[in-house]
């Protein structure tokens, strides 16, 4: 078992792959792949296991942000009050911007760390 944070080229490639698949956040594909890699490499590499856990946390966070955005958008679309409409429209836009910025920047930062 690899105790230190040093890793070989194969691990670096896998780390880059784990973060790159996060961009395909469609139908829980990255979550499934990350769980498979986590189970496969749990006992082989401590560092790779930590990266898988980070990536899984990231994917689940993005899914939660999109669900919250969907709920805000649904409420915005079905409200009768102009005041509530603009509040929920603003919340929808803010959550969508935050999740997309996080979605675009965080994997790049993690790949550069590898």
Image (tube, rainbow, N blue to C red):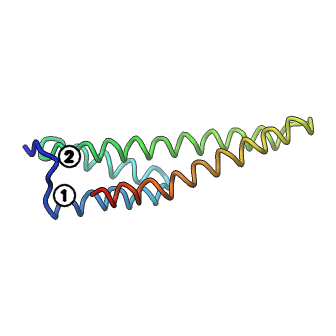
Which quadrant holds the N terminus?
Answer: top left
Q: Residue at x 33, y 61 (%)?
A: 112
From the top left corner, tell me how far across and down residue 67 is, in percent: 60, 41
- The secondary element bearing badge 2 is classed as helix
Residue 99's mark? none
From the top left corner, tell me how far across and down residue 37 is, in percent: 25, 50
Of 6 and 11, the residue lying toward us: 6
Q: Quadrant of residue 65?
A: top right
Which quadrant holds the C terminus?
Answer: bottom left
70 left or right, relative to 46: right
Q: Is residue 22 above or below residue 3?
A: below
Q: Residue at x 24, y 59 (%)?
A: 14
Q: Residue at x 77, y 44 (%)?
A: 90
51 left or right, relative to 63: left
Q: Quadrant of residue 107?
A: bottom left
45 left or right, relative to 26: left
Q: Residue at x 65, y 44 (%)?
A: 95
Of 42 and 12, the residue lying toward us: 12
Tell me if mark 1 has few (under 14), some (14-19) or many (20+) residues whose alpha carbon lies within 10 angstroms of its own.
Answer: some
Report which residue position mark 2 lands on: 47
- The secondary element bearing badge 1 is classed as helix
Residue 11's mark? 1
From the top left corner, tell me how far across and down residue 5 is, in percent: 16, 47
From the top left corner, tell me how far across and down residue 91 is, in percent: 73, 41
Tell me if mark 2 has few (under 14), some (14-19) or many (20+) residues whose alpha carbon lies within 10 angstroms of its own.
Answer: some
* Spatial CA span between label 2 and label 1: 9 Å
- Mark 2 touches mark 1? (CB < 8 Å): yes
How many numbered discs sit on the rendered protein?
2
Q: Is residue 70 above or below residue 13?
A: above
């Amino acid at each position: 078992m690899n105790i230190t944070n040093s890793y070989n080229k194969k691990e670096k490639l896998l780390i880059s792959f784990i973060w790159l698949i996060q961009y395909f956040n469609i139908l829980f594909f990255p979550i499934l792949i990350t769980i498979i890699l986590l189970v496969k490499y749990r006992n082989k590499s401590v560092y790779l296991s930590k990266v898988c856990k980070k990536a899984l946390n990231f994917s689940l966070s993005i899914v939660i942000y999109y669900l919250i955005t969907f709920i805000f958008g649904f409420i915005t679309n079905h409200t009768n009050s102009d005041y509530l409409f603009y509040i929920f429209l603003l919340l929808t836009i803010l959550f969508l911007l935050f999740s997309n910025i996080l979605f675009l920047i965080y994997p790049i930062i993690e790949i550069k760390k590898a």
